[in-house]
Amino acid sequence: DTGVSQNPRHKITKRGQNVTFRCDPISEHNRLYWYRQTLGQGPEFLTYFQNEAQLEKSRLLSDRFSAERPKGSFSTLEIQRTEQGDSAMYLCASSYGERREQFFGPGTRLTVL
Amino acid sequence: DQQVKQNSPSLSVQEGRISILNCDYTNSMFDYFLWYKKYPAEGPTFLISISSIKDKNEDGRFTVFLNKSAKHLSLHIVPSQPGDSAVYFCAASAGGTDKLIFGTGTRLQVFP
């Protein structure tokens, strides 16, 4: 069991650019979640997939954000026209079946200049 | 609206003693609670969880207590070790939704 992996680990971009992050969940985990964490705060829920279906989106997920999980395996999170307020740690987590424990990846730290 | 609150931003405990981390919640629909540990530059690591049908769950040095009437839970670490030094997050979820609602964390420092 290799754990949840995320790439890249760090991303520095200029305001207005688009960025895409990738998450590979634990093998056979059918549920995948995206969270965002800023300094001094706990992770905040963004969106969640069960297999390839996106079942819930937070109001934090503006129309500049889009997430996909095309084959029910890995997922991508894209941010278009990045803003300085998008600077944060983006965390991916996965879970299996009916179990409610979520297992997190190491995160992607985004810095928007 | 902070539904999960960790009112102590930091806690310092001597090695070998008990660490008690506290968490309060406001949403009575929460039925599952979790504790995560986080080191710098890493993602949160799952520690222990408890369902609302229980009032205690134990796993090695870690015990979580749930007081539903007070909407309060606590994590006990006995004995505390220097490797336990990290930020601890309390999280909760409500049946029917899988999203976790996190507190703001408590930084635990265990000193020799």
Image (cartoon, coloured by chain):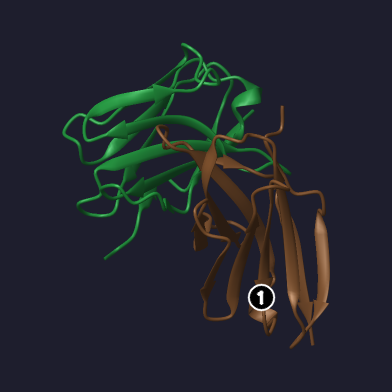
Asked which quadrant contains residue A82, the reply is top right
Could one spot residue B71 in this view of the protein?
Answer: yes
Chain appearing in brown on the rendered image = B
Asked which quadrant contains residue B106, the reply is bottom right
Image height of A36 relative to B34, above or below? above
Residue drawn where x is 33% and y is 49% of the image? A95
Image height of A16 relative to B31, above or below? above
Q: Amino acid at mark 1?
A: Ile
Q: Is residue B61 left or right of residue B108?
A: left
The quadrant of the image that shows the N terminus of chain A is bottom left
Residue drawn where x is 49% and y is 53% of the image? B53
- The image shows residue A6 at horizontal and vertical percentages of 39, 47
The quadrant of the image that shows the C terminus of chain A is top right
Which chain does the residue under circle 1 lie in?
B
Residue pushed farthest left?
A71
Q: Nearer the viewer, residue A42 or A14?
A: A42
Chain appearing in green on the rendered image = A
Q: Residues within 10 Å of mark 1 (few under 14, many from 20)?
A: many
Which residue is disc 1 drawn over?
A: B77
Q: Nearer the viewer, residue B98 or B27?
A: B27
Q: Nearer the viewer, residue B95 or A50?
A: B95
- The image shows residue A61 at horizontal and vertical percentages of 50, 20
Q: Is residue A13 left or right of residue B95?
A: right
- The image shows residue A24 at horizontal and vertical percentages of 29, 47
Residue drawn where x is 79% and y is 88% of the image? B112
Residue drawn where x is 75% and y is 79% of the image? B18
Residue pushed farthest top?
A63
Image height of A11 relative to B75, above or below? above
Could one spot residue A109 in this view of the protein?
Answer: no
Disc 1 element? strand
- The image shows residue A103 at horizontal and vertical percentages of 41, 54
